[in-house]
């Protein structure tokens, strides 16, 4: 049952990762029919904080950031202009006038409550051409250490509550002393005499052209495209110049995810009949005005996230008790400080996800029917009457000695909910307090067997499940779901139907964990690590994943928070050494590793175990009886997630022949394909984020659109 339950948590993680991506959220996501409704939404579902140290780091590294963002660099052509001097008609830039801009330095200053001021120095180089009846000339333009200033205004759209921004006109002016006109001597003296006038012409072209194209680029980032929704532009707006406009202004588009996710496609390999879908809105925005919830606070920059999700209630999902439906509206807010709570360490980036939003999201996923599973022997080889008879012998009698198909149906009868824990580990690597508690009350499981062409119900039971989930990270910032030996708790088991079985009720209840261990680990083998979206070349150095704002009288918290520093691809530590499999007796495995290292394992593509330190460590492996299994192990230096050996080792465990065979190939495990996020987001109703956050804003100020061929 571990993987079936945790599939819900992994799905939530994938959806959040999709929403935060800088590229797109294609794959299983499609367009919404129209704007996401005003309800159900959770405001302040997540918060993002950039501390002053992060802003300073971005400012210091802005030239490197722009180089990564702009493939062709900061290049543009001046437009053609005409003028007349003393009766001589001059055409400036009749032939190409290419200019190149190099950013030398920058300084970002925040101005409360909603301004980002950028001051920078640039070099401008290129060629200016002048044509007239006197002839043609061109001369170099080389301007060094030129100051440039811009002001970014952060805003909340009144109609939608979505985050948006604008840029006030940039100030840049060329002075006559900063370049020399080099033309044929016959009229070089004349142009030199009128250099101030020519300079004013150049300034009249360069400044407005830069601002014009910056405005266009901002429109592409913030305005709602006409084809964003299946129904086109929302009334009363109309499509003009590719964007939905009303009253002379474009409508604001969501900067995160707004689309329909086909959840059922994740189960296509094992449950092709699952048609669950979910409409999602996860985008920066807020309900309160900027004066009440400022973007600039305590010398840092903060963004809030609106989270909304909706699905029609699937036929397999009962009408919920109103008391079980989580509320929507405004979530509590976390007051970020300069240091990590409970640790005192400084950080650059903080992200806090509200428990209220997780409850809303997981409720709508449940409502969609995503957890209504139907799997059988045709999709899972281990699910058969022969396998069941190893645990419940009377199944063999019912099957009349044959190996018959078996079907398993799972029906969640009540909404699940999530609680956030402290998220701590013990010195030996075991989970102290999980970061997430996933509660699934009243989960009904039905086992069927196909006998003489008819499906007969063998067993039906209901139980309450609690999954205690820990999370850790790989060196490339993928999130690893961690389950220990006691991470799944079963309570309140109820036998509903078992008339065909000869075993006593108590014996059947004892057998349930073994039954689930056979079937359900195969369901989500491919739901592996969850990737944190790329941040335009930045690498997150995760400092802490923890629960924040503990609720009075409970062990639960209001927020799941990630604290991290930013860096540019820091050199990774040398990976830890290989593990040696000393022994496997069918139920437990013993390994030898270096004394300063720790080890985690998984079997048959299941979830990774918690890390355990060396030099000798042991893991329980309650594998299904008989058959062959693949065991994986990987090591890292104690407490250093960036030293993880992501390749690790693999062994084939042949239970029937009691042998261990080392494996070198690493094929992808069979199971449910992950939610794909391809580079091409065409066809997806997804908004592109503001490219990793703050550092795109300076890029918008300095970048001219690349030459459009």
Image: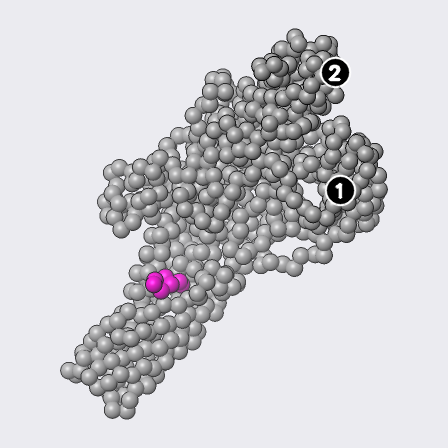
For the C terminus, give its image quadrant.
bottom left
- Which residue shows up at 47% across the image and 69% down it? 104
- Asked whether residue 707 is in view, the answer is yes
Residue numbers of the magenta segment:
702-709
Q: Residues within 10 Å of mark 1 (few under 14, many from 20)?
A: some
In this image, 80 relative to 475: left or right?
left
Compared to residue 619, the image places residue 136 above or below, namely: below
At numbered mark 2, what does the secondary structure look like: helix, strand or loop? loop
In percent of width and height, residue 614 lies at: 81, 45
- Which residue shows up at 35% across the image and 35% down it? 33
- Which residue shows up at 81% across the image and 49% down it? 594
Give the image quarter of residue 458. top right
Q: Residue furthest top?
A: 499
At numbered mark 1, what does the secondary structure look like: helix, strand or loop? strand
In percent of width and height, residue 513 lies at: 70, 23
Residue that label 1 marks: 651
In this view of the protein, which residue sits in the foreground, 153 or 68? 68
For the N terminus, give its image quadrant.
top right
Residue that label 2 marks: 393
């Amino acid at each position: 049952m571990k993987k079936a339950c945790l599939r819900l948590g992994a799905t939530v993680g994938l959806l959040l990762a999709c929403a935060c991506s800088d590229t797109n959220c294609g794959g299983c996501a499609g367009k919404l029919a129209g704007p996401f409704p005003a309800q159900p939404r959770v405001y302040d579902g997540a918060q993002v904080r950039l501390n002053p140290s992060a802003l300073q780091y971005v400012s210091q590294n802005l030239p490197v950031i722009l180089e990564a963002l702009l493939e062709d660099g900061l290049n543009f052509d001046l437009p053609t202009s005409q003028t007349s001097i003393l009766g001589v008609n001059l055409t400036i830039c009749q032939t190409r006038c290419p200019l190149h801009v190099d950013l030398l330095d920058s300084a970002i200053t925040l101005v409360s409550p909603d301004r980002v001021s950028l001051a920078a120095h640039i070099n401008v180089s290129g060629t200016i051409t002048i044509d007239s009846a006197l002839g043609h000339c061109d001369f170099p333009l080389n301007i060094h250490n030129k100051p440039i200033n811009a002001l970014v205004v952060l805003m909340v759209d009144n109609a939608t509550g979505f985050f948006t921004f604008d840029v006030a006109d940039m100030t840049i002016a060329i002075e006559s002393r900063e370049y020399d006109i080099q033309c044929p001597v016959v009229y070089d003296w004349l142009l030199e005499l009128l250099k101030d006038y020519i300079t004013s012409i150049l300034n009249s072209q360069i400044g407005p052209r830069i601002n014009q194209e910056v405005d266009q680029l901002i429109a592409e980032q913030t305005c709602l495209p006409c084809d964003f929704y299946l129904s086109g532009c929302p009334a009363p707006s109309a499509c003009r110049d590719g964007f939905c406009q009303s009253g002379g202004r474009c409508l604001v588009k969501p900067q995160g995810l707004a689309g329909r996710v086909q959840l059922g496609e994740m189960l296509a390999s094992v449950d092709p009949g699952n048609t669950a879908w979910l409409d999602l809105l996860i985008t920066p925005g807020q309900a309160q005005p900027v004066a009440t919830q400022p973007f600039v606070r305590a010398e840092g920059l903060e963004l809030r996230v609106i989270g909304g999700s909706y699905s029609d209630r699937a036929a397999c999902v009962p009408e919920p008790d109103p008391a079980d439906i989580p509320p929507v509206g405004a979530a509590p807010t976390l007051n970020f400080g300069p240091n990590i709570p409970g640790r005192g360490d400084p950080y650059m980036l903080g992200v806090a996800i509200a428990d209220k939003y997780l409850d809303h999201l997981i409720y709508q996923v449940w409502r969609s029917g995503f957890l209504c599973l139907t799997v059988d022997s045709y999709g899972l080889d281990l699910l058969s009457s022969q396998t069941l008879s190893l645990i419940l012998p009377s199944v063999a009698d019912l099957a009349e000695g044959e190996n018959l198909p078996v079907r398993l149906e799972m029906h969640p009868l009540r909404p699940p909910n999530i609680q956030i824990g402290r998220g701590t580990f013990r010195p030996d690597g075991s989970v102290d307090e999980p970061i997430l508690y996933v509660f699934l009350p009243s989960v009904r499981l039905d086992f069927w067997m196909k006998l003489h062409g008819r499906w007969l119900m063998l067993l039906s039971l209901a139980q309450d499940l609690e999954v205690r989930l820990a999370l850790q990270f790989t060196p490339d910032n993928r999130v690893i779901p961690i389950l220990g030996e006691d991470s799944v708790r079963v309570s309140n088991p109820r036998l509903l139907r078992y008339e065909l079985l000869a075993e006593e009720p108590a014996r059947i209840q004892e057998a349930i964990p073994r039954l689930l261990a056979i079937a359900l680990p195969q369901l989500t083998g491919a739901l592996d690590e969850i990737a944190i979206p790329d941040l335009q070349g930045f690498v997150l150095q995760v400092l802490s994943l923890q629960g924040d704002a503990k609720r009075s009288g409970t062990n639960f918290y209001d927020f799941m928070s990630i604290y991290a520093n930013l860096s540019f691809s820091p050199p990774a530590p040398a990976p830890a050494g290989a593990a040696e499999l000393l022994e496997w007796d069918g139920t437990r495995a013993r390994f030898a590793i270096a004394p300063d290292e720790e080890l985690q394992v998984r079997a048959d593509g299941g979830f990774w175990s918690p890390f355990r330190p060396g030099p000798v460590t042991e893991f329980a492996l309650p594998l299904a009886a008989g058959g062959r299994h693949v065991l994986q192990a990987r090591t890292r230096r104690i407490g250093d997630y960036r030293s993880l050996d992501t390749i690790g080792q693999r062994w084939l465990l042949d239970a029937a022949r009691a042998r261990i065979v080392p494996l070198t190939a690493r094929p992808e495990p069979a199971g449910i394909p992950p939610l794909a996020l391809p580079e091409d987001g065409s066809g997806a109703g997804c908004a592109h984020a503001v490219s990793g956050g703050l550092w795109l804003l300076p890029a918008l100020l300095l970048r001219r659109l690349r030459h459009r061929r």
